[in-house]
Image (cartoon, rainbow, N blue to C red):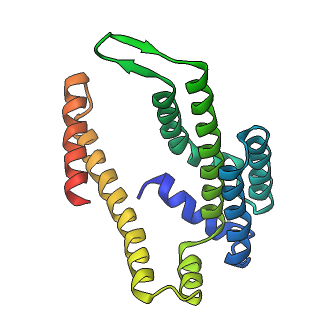
Amino acid sequence: MSAGTAAIDSVAWRSTWRRRSVAEKVILFGGIVGCAVVLPPIPAAPLLIVVTLIAARRAGVPFAHVFRTVRGPATFIAIAALSTAVSIDFGARTVSMTAETASGAAELALRAMTASLAMLVFASTTPMTTLTTALRRAGLPAACVDVIGIMYRMVFVLVESLATIRQAQVARLGYVGFRRSLNSAGLLTAAVLVRS
């Protein structure tokens, strides 16, 4: 099991907000996401990020955990913002960026980072079993809740198999040299995609 995936679950179980009502947390973090989407990103996004970090601190979620778990989404958001800001014309062989596209990309990145941070803190304060129980009480059909639980468990199984395959590749010197690393990464990707 990967440290990142398991970390969110274990931090959620240690959170001081673990016993708080799921509805309270949904209103808080859902409200932050809603504000991030609706309000202008400046000054709303920085203020909402501060509110989210204060909530994380009050919930007993370590900042190191928050920053470690937000790295993945931040990388994805940065790539998305860059692809939004930059325009490539293959016919004329030019790469361009205007002030308008840069501004739009910055707004996109601020909104997405704020919403992602809020959802990660929500996940770090609410164990999955508590969430599925709350969904059942809210009237979500049992079949849907079961699918959510199965998908959650399958993520752990997939991440565990990924770690096991990678560990076996490392033991067989699969990442010594560029060509072997590329080959091993391709085989790892293929194995994980087949298992998913």
Rendered image quadrant of residue 9 = bottom right
**Viewer-proximal residue among 138 and 84:** 84
Question: In which quadrant of the rendered image does the N terminus lie?
Answer: bottom left
Q: Position of residue 29 (x, y in %)?
A: 69, 62
135 to 113, vertically: above or below = below
Q: Position of residue 128 (x, y in %)?
A: 54, 73
Q: Position of residue 142 (x, y in %)?
A: 44, 88
**Viewer-proximal residue among 74 and 176:** 74
In-image side of 79 versus 167 (left or right):
right
126 to 115, vertically: above or below = below
79 to 189, vertically: above or below = above
Query: Residue at image x 65%, y 39%?
Result: 110
Q: Position of residue 159 (x, y in %)?
A: 36, 57
Query: Residue at image x 59%, y 39%?
Result: 108
Question: In which quadrant of the rendered image does the C terminus lie?
Answer: bottom left
In-image side of 117 versus 3 (left or right):
right
**Viewer-proximal residue among 124 and 10:** 124
Rendered image quadrant of residue 149 = bottom left
Query: Residue at image x 22%, y 35%?
Result: 174
